[in-house]
Image: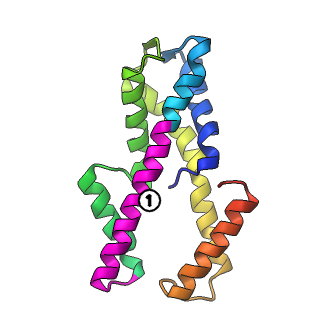
Amino acid sequence: MKVYPGRIPTICKEIVEALMSETLIEVVPEMVEEVELDIASILKEYNRMDREITDRGRDHIAERGLPYSHLFKVKSKLASERGFGIGDDAVDYLSSQVIEMLLHTAHVDEVFGEDHDLRRKMRPVFRRQMAVDSDLDQEVRNKIKNLQEGSSDWEIEYRKVMGELKDARHLG
């Protein structure tokens, strides 16, 4: 799962609205935008860390001459060593980060909800907004199914087609 930069403002707004609508958090109206910005900083940092781990994973498989298909396994190991959530663990990782921020930011007046209640309200937002990634991935794979996965041609074409689809859907 991936957090697309173009989706970050929507994710932040939906999370704050969901938590406030259930009175799980209390935020004065003037501070709502600040809370959204706090969540946005978490999501941007998540993307930065994800890129860093992906780059290290690519370097690792290149150094060892491993096939590209090993990237996810190597990336998972690197993420685990850092306590970082990727793939299916991304939603729980991000939810935990947001909860931690809610408890410590001066922009939230009160947190009334228990952690599990906060997670319950955030998970659907994250899953819905991040599901775009798996849909895009499947669409790209369908378009380049004539190429052998893991080959350099496949990698180049995958990035090209993914970029075109992201641009067309304004996912940045």
Measured along the vertical axis of the image, is residue 92 above or below residue 122? Answer: below
**Residue at horizontal 58 percent and vertical 51 percent from the top:** 4
Measured along the vertical axis of the image, is residue 25 above or below residue 169? Answer: above
The residue wearing badge 1 is: 51
Percent x, y of residue 82: 27, 52
Percent x, y of residue 114: 38, 21
**Residue at horizontal 33 percent and vertical 50 percent from the top:** 84
Percent x, y of residue 119: 44, 32
In this view, the residue in front, 143 or 120, is 143
Total numbered badges shown on the rendered structure: 1
- Asked which secondary structure carries label 1, the reply is helix
Which secondary structure type mostly characterizes the magenta part of the structure? Answer: helix
Q: Quadrant of the C terminus?
A: bottom right
Question: Is 106 contained in the magenta span?
Answer: no
Residue type at numbered disc 1:
Arg
In this view, the residue in front, 147 or 46, is 46
From the viewer's perspective, tell me whether residue 142 is left or right of residue 62: right
**Residue at horizontal 44 percent and vertical 52 percent from the top:** 48
Name, please, the residue furthest toward the right: 168
Measured along the vertical axis of the image, is residue 41 above or below residue 77? Answer: above
Percent x, y of residue 62: 34, 81
User: How was the colour assigned to the protein in this rendering?
Assistant: rainbow
**Dot 1 surroundings within 10 Å: few (below 14), some, or many (20 or more)?**
few
**Residue at horizontal 59 percent and vertical 67 percent from the top:** 137
* Image: magenta residue range: 41-67
